[in-house]
Image (cartoon, coloured by chain):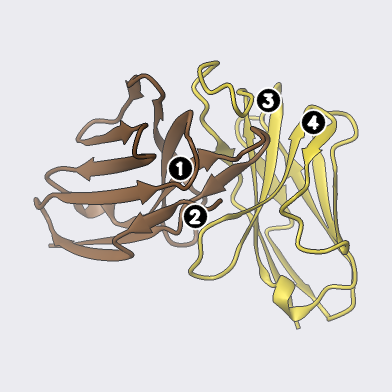
Amino acid sequence: GAGVSQSPRYKVAKRGQDVALRCDPISGHVSLFWYQQALGQGPEFLTYFQNEAQLDKSGLPSDRFFAERPEGSVSTLKIQRTQQEDSAVYLCASSSSLPGLALRGTGELFFGEGSRLTVL
Amino acid sequence: QQPVQSPQAVILREGEDAVINCSSSKALYSVHWYRQKHGEAPVFLMILLKGGEQKGHEKISASFNEKKQQSSLYLTASQLSYSGTYFCGTEGNTGNQFYFGTGTSLTVIP
């Protein structure tokens, strides 16, 4: 597609429910990142995929968070047994560049509009 | 590993200049700058590469001091459209992470 697409845009979950957030990156983009952004804060790194490989998941806050990108394009962030502290905007970003090799390509991250999760 | 930005917030009148600083605790290969308007996704402004190459934006420029692990964003003759939160971004230790700074809220008033 023309840009990074995320769905749903808004999700309200009751505490304890499982949620799945989808990210459709720009076609051909190798790199895909997930971020969590709480109100008034900066985006916090969650995880990174290079094609289908999840090369870093050090930012995932707990084992309730799980991400996948099975075919190297669409990615899903799943949160199990949601808690109130999970309420945030979840941003997905894709890039044609590889981290650590910023001299290749422009290095620009293209963000989706985010999925706003509210846990009641 | 999150970069620290200063100031946290700044209010300018249209036409005034501003400087936003970004400081990292680790060696940097590159520094990115993004702007996020309320309720919207961050938008790329520029990247500064080790060695001094800069890919820029009209009226917004930046510097990158590799030795000090710092970058500064310069906004000249600010316009109302410059309002938003500015984030610097840097790669993490392993090269498979990308961290955003603490953010600087910029408000331009008429």
Tell whether label 1 touches label 4 (CB within 8 Å): no
Q: Which mark is residue A73?
A: 4
Q: Are marks 2 and 3 on the same chain?
A: no
Compared to A93, does B66 lie above or below? above
For residue A27, side relative to residue B88 (left or right): right
Say yes or no: labels 4 and 1 on the same chain: no
Locate residue A26: give its quadrant.
top right
Disc 3 crowd rating (10 Å Cα; few below 14, some 14-19, many 20+) is some
**How many discs appear?**
4
Would you name the residue on which mark 1 appears?
A: B43
* Disc 3 residue type (three-letter): His
Identify the element where label 2 is drawn. loop
Q: CA distance from mark 3 to mark 4?
A: 8 Å
Q: Which residue sits furthest top?
A: A104
What amino acid does circle 4 point to?
Ser
Left or right of B26 in this view: B19: left
Local crowd at mark 4 within 10 Å, few (<14), some, or many (≥20)?
Answer: many
Report the chain holding disc 4.
A
Tell me, yes or no, whether the two marked residues, 2 and 4, touch with CB atoms within 8 Å: no
Q: Closest to the observer: B34 or A44?
A: A44
In the rendering, at what x and y percent does residue B52 appear?
Answer: 32, 21
- Chain letter for the brown colouring in the rendering: B
Mark with earlier residue (3, 4):
3
Q: Would you name the residue on which mark 2 appears?
A: B40
User: Against A17, is B76 above or below?
Assistant: above
Q: Are marks 1 and 2 on the same chain?
A: yes
Q: Which residue is mark 3?
A: A29
Q: Amino acid at mark 1?
A: Val
Taking B100 as reference, is A47 left or right?
A: right
